[in-house]
Amino acid sequence: MTRARAYLDHNATTPLRPAAREAMVAALGQGGNASSVHREGRHARALIEAARESLARFVKTQPKNVYFTSGATEALNLALTPGLELDGNKAPFDVLLVSAGEHAGVLQGHRFPAAAVEKLPLTPDGVLDLAALDTALARHAGRRVLLALQAANNETGVLQPVAAAAGRVQAAGGALVCDAVQAAGKAACDFAALGADILVLSAHKIGGPQGAGALCFGAGRHHIADTIVRGGGQERGLRAGTENVAAIAGFAAATESLAEAGAIEIARLARLRDRLERDVLVSAPDVVFFGAGVARLPNTANFAVPGVGAEVLLMALDLEGVAVSSGSACSSGKVKRSHVLEAMSVPSALAEGAIRVSFGWSSEEDDVDMFRIAFAKAVETIRSKRVKPAA
Ligand code: PLP
């Protein structure tokens, strides 16, 4: 065994890829403000525009449709507004539909009045209930509907029926904003496959740096009447503020690495994850896997062992050198009940034990070995200490 730690929390954030680090160091060394006209400024501008082209190739749109932000949360806040204008239609969106499993960046970040927002249920497998979407669209007939639907869930990895939902919403005159943060590099993640009107990406989920994201539009004209960060007009007025050139360059380098690895990497991640799930079953035959019956990301396992609390298991694994997550990543530090598992009707006693293991570019077989040994030990220790109920 060669590793000191097994980092199995890639859905929370990924280690920086060497290619991204190199690109960032080079950009930092070069310096320059992309708005300046001198050579240094032009170099910074060239890095940003090359990055825009990388992102555009990745999601299959034109570079002019890609806007850099501080992350996916900002991009979601920016896009999810009644003031979003697509194809020259200036009529405000009346209704925001969100799937119940969306990230907090959608659930808390949108800019619609509370009365205009409707949450759509998930099936027990964690998939958006398309029949409920149809019902909602019929109910809102004649109104402009925006649907926020993620490509893949960050907790369970369950893939969402984005293309099917986009077809329905667009046929009703609405539009779909897709949080594709977790799908990038692990599942279909472009306009052709997803059919969305807008895609949102985050650099730090793909081996790029924290603090960079992208708001990408598909074909057609677009505008946002009520932008958030206003000032010097950067990013063609949609997102002011001096660009984070190094982070953007790192984001692009990570994106290029994803595009190169493709299907081979997806298969490799699935092998690691499947092996880990088999190991979990051996140590805890009563384990319950969430979302495992439907199409899901190749890198994510989410499960609970009845009677074994997530917090104590997570800490026991951490002491053994294994980093995993409980609940959603953005709530780590405190273990709170998962709204995703709740939407899947998982009983709360079981949901409180949910652990998420997520692999990524730096994961290897050694990590699975470390997890297997640490998990078997932790489960045995926790269960042996459990007070048996009186007969
Ligand atoms: N959407 C999903 C599905 C995520 O997993 C995350 C990060 O946890 C975000 C959005 C927010 O991304 P960022 O950290 O770039 O704001």
Image (cartoon, rainbow, N blue to C red):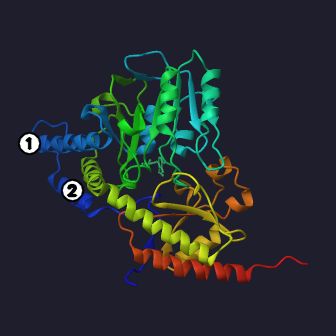
Placement of 249 over or under 38, stated as above or below: below
> Which label sits on residue 87?
none
Tell which circle, 1 or 2, labels the residue nearer the N-terminal end. Answer: 2
Q: Where does residue 282 sit, x and y in percent of width and height?
A: 60, 77
- In the rendered structure, which amino acid carries the disc numbered 1? Arg
Cβ at disc 1 under 8 Å from ligand 1? no
Q: Where does residue 238 sit, x and y in percent of width and height?
A: 34, 30
Q: CA distance from mark 1 to mark 2?
A: 19 Å
The residue located at (49%, 48%) in the rendering is 152
The residue located at (66%, 83%) in the rendering is 381
Left or right of 345 in this view: 140: left
Task: Label 1, secondary structure: give it.
Answer: helix
Cβ at disc 2 under 8 Å from ligand 1? no
Left or right of 88 in this view: 46: left
Find out whether the residues at labels 1 and 2 contact each other: C-beta distance under 8 Å. no
Quadrant of residue 235 in the image? Answer: top left
Placement of 386 over or under 163, stated as above or below: below
- In the rendered structure, which amino acid carries the disc numbered 2? Ala
The residue located at (58%, 73%) in the rendering is 280
Left or right of 309 in this view: 160: left
Quadrant location of the C terminus? bottom right
Query: Can the viewer see residue 234?
Result: no
Q: Residues within 10 Å of mark 2 (few under 14, many from 20)?
A: many
Identify the residue under disc 1: 39
In this view, the residue in front, 149 or 237, is 149
Residue lying farthest left?
A: 39
Task: Label 2, secondary structure: give it.
Answer: helix
Quadrant location of the N terminus? bottom left
Query: Can the viewer see residue 329?
Result: yes
- Camera-near label (1 vs 2) is 2
Q: Where does residue 51 sit, x and y in percent of width and height?
A: 23, 44
In this view, the residue in front, 65 or 306, is 306
